[in-house]
Amino acid sequence: NPGGIAGIYAYENSRSALFEAMQRRETFGTSGPRIEPRFYAGWNLGEDICQSSNYLADAYRDGVPMGSYLPPATAGASSGPVFVASATRDPRDGGNPLQRIQIIKGWIDSEGRTHEAVFDIAGAAAGEASVDQNTCAVSGKGFSQLCAAWQDPQFDPSLAAVYYARVLENPSCRWSHYDCLTLPESDRPPSCSDPELPWQVQERAWTSPIWYRPPPA
């Protein structure tokens, strides 16, 4: 599905601030919609941070944003880092509601094999919203905003790992299917009814990762 967008969190809209944000990797991408994801990690982030009226200030004060390396654990820190992910839907007219936020974890085991795990941390399960193939109308459960704090149930302080957040919208029609519906049924090309061609998509956003490295022995 064409039309990806890159986003940058900068202190201001100036050349120097934008380049500084790219250098610290506080960036994200989307498959097209203007979803705004956030992702932080810290040893002392509160599990109720999403309910804070100073959410962003607290996250920057007590954690690091996407694109960062997680610093060593501080004295009195919890058994594992707390990750916080949030997202706001595309605010434009017709913007699709969000479905859920996932955190993706990657690591390499002692034998050099790569692994990936996906954790749903906020929102609704797949299948709780749908899109009508004949009208492209979306129905079911969806969200304008999502936020959640999460700890890795498999966290191993001796194992390096990388984490990033992925935000999924509810299913929607693919751009080609919208084009098909603008034509009378008798004038639609064979591709409009080809079962091999997808007629729906699930737009998404993904953040830069946060890296964890174990302290030196």
Image: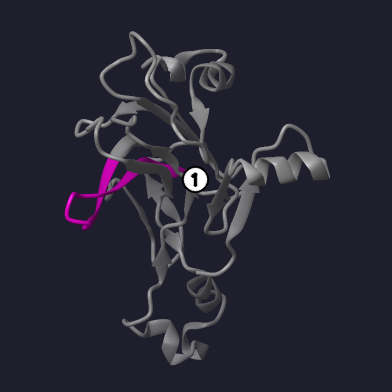
Q: Quadrant of residue 130?
A: bottom left
Q: Secondary structure at mark 1?
A: strand
169 or 155: which is nearer to us? 155
Q: Residue at x 44, y 27 (%)?
A: 71
Residue extent of the magenta highlight? 97-119
Colouring of the image: one colour
216 left or right of 176 in image: left
Q: Give the x, y percent position of residue 162.
A: 37, 43
Majority SS type along the magenta span: strand
Establish if 168 lies above or below 2.
above
Q: Is residue 113 magenta?
A: yes
Q: Residue at x 58, y 44 (%)?
A: 25
Q: Give the x, y percent position of residue 105.
A: 31, 44
**Badge 1 amino acid:** Thr
Considering every residue shown, the one lying at the far left of the view is 111
Establish if 200 lies above or below 209.
below
Q: Which residue is mark 1?
A: 207
173 or 154: which is nearer to us? 154
Disc 1: CA contacts within 10 A as few (<14), some (14-19) or many (>=20) = many
Considering every residue shown, the one lying at the far front of the view is 217
Q: Give the x, y percent position of residue 23.
A: 65, 45
Picture mark count: 1
Q: Residue at x 61, y 40 (%)?
A: 24
Q: Give the x, y percent position of residue 66.
A: 51, 38
Q: Is residue 174 visible?
A: yes
58 left or right of 73 in image: right
Which quadrant: the C terminus? top left
Considering every residue shown, the one lying at the far top of the view is 76
81 left or right of 95 in image: left
203 or 60: which is nearer to us? 60
Q: Is residue 92 visible?
A: no
